[in-house]
Amino acid sequence: MGIFISVPKTIECIAVAVVLALLLSGCCYRLLGILQSLGYGGKKFFKWAGRADNMTLSRHVLLTIICALSSAVLGLCFSFAGEYAGLCSLAAFVLFLPLYIWADNRVALKVPLSFTPRLKRLYAALVLIIAIFAYIAVTLLNFADFVWGNAVFSVLRYVPLSVFGLLLLPLVAFANLVSKIYEIPRNRGFIKKATAKLKNSRIKVVGITGSYGKTSVKHILAEILSKKYRVLATPRSHNTPLGLALTINNNDLNEYDILIAEMGARHVGDIAELCRICPPEIAVITGICPQHLESFGTVENIVSAKGEILQSCKTAVIAEDCIKLFTDYTCEKLTAAEVSGVESSAEGCSFTLGINGEKVNAHTKLLGEHSAYNIALAAQVASLLGMKTADIAAAIPQIDYIEHRLQLIKSGGINVLDDGYNSNVRGAAAAISALKKFGGKKIVVTPGLVELGVLEKSENYALGGELVGLDFVILVGERLIEPVKQGYLEKGGELEKLKVVLGLEAAKAELQKVIGQGDAVLFLNDLPDAY
């Protein structure tokens, strides 16, 4: 037994465990990116991993088989080296694990992994956990070799370490679970600090929620209000408790007059939680559709969740097509400013805006008729906050495109409509309608719509029907495109104008074959990696 616990053997066990931990954690880069995109949700992570079309498990099985076979072959080839043959067999891991890292990272994450402090802590926990499990495994294998004393087993003793290739998913999930022991209390303290800071400030809060259009209305409202007030808005789609807390804690609220808080939800109770952190004086509900039906379960739950914002505000501005859904709430409820005479073109949208009995002509470069109604919601809020109708009208032409939300990008004489962050039914219809306003060939690139629960198939079928009449349709992926393809063909679409590819890069290659100057292409919904 003294030989087994010798210093050289202990060093060997530690060295093998450390090298394996570093290599295996490198193999988890993509998994960490998926986990981060899912908000570090363990259940969502396993649901993603268990999808029938997910090739991640297959790649892990292949990695395990390759490592096992090559490790066994190397061990047997170097059997003449005696007890060092086992160490020689480890060369298989040193060769194939980096090769897997290289191959796995050739397909870039659509949303790059962000090395936030939380991610760094999670990665450190992952390396430590793998190192501990690897050390235990290596020690047990060496102990078995010491007790058994079989020459063949001694040569092949490290081959069973190949099983770690199958354990990458559970190891990442376990590291995430362990890290939450620290992260959850820390996040609660961070949110509590933000809640107290906001309560002690004089800033007015406008809360915006809805199934679609939240970010667009937030952007429009911020641009209009900034002509008179100092405005702080939650950045991008930071519409979670931590997103609100970051905005509040990272800014001096005394430097601002108004905070515009986007509030997202996937479950009943989410909006109520956000309102406890950031209670709005004025609330905005942009609209209701079956978006996130997968997590909400029913449209009634969506309405109930969005309605939670009305329990925390004095006044609410609600889109006219859904205000009847919220009649039971006691706060003052107003519709958007009046909109009439909407004319949409490739140059934007012109309309007449009516606020408090005053009517003004307005024009925006934002595409699609729906932009007029988003502006109308923002205009009503701006009026409630004291802006004059003339000032609101003067601000509208200066509203800039909203990144990844029907954003027009002119490139080499081609009109690119970037609607990559749009994944809802209403927005998709508006984007396709806007595309049809352009001259030249009209092309759409889309992977379909997600998070629609039981309606996912029917809504994607309907989306396919809306694509009929376009000059070229490129469908991307595997999971959602079948109902889109079926809807397109059954509603009269032409097969020769349809192309199905597996990834965005392949879609761009196909696009190059058919697009030219004066043409327009719509990128409709760039699915996150978790889909």
Image (cartoon, rainbow, N blue to C red):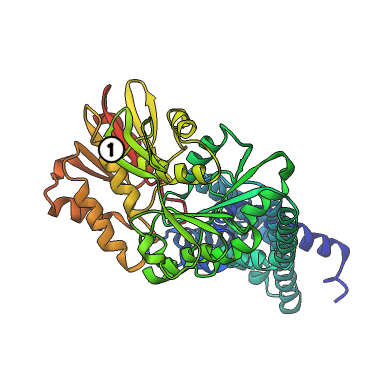
Name the side, left or right, on which 509 lies relative to 35. Answer: left
Which residue is at a point 88% across and 74% down the rendered structure image?
2
Please determine whether, in this image, residue 430 is positioned above or below residue 303: above
- Residue 62 drawn at (x, y percent): 47, 59
- Residue 224 drawn at (x, y percent): 51, 36
Name the side, left or right, on which 142 lies relative to 531. Answer: right
Label 1 residue SS: strand
Which residue is at a point 68% across and 61% down the rendered structure image?
86
Q: Nearer the viewer, residue 11 or 99?
A: 99
Name the side, left or right, on which 47 lies relative to 119. Answer: left
Q: Nearer the viewer, residue 528 or 478?
A: 528
Outermost residue, bottom side: 147
User: Which residue is labeled 1 in the image?
Assistant: 342
Please determine whether, in this image, residue 177 is positioned above or below residue 38: below
Label 1 Cα neighbours within 10 Å, binned few <14 / some 14-19 / many ≥20: some
Q: Amino acid at mark 1?
A: Val
Whether residue 82 appears in this view of the structure is no
Numbered marks: total: 1
Q: Nearer the viewer, residue 333 or 377?
A: 333
Quadrant showing the N terminus: bottom right
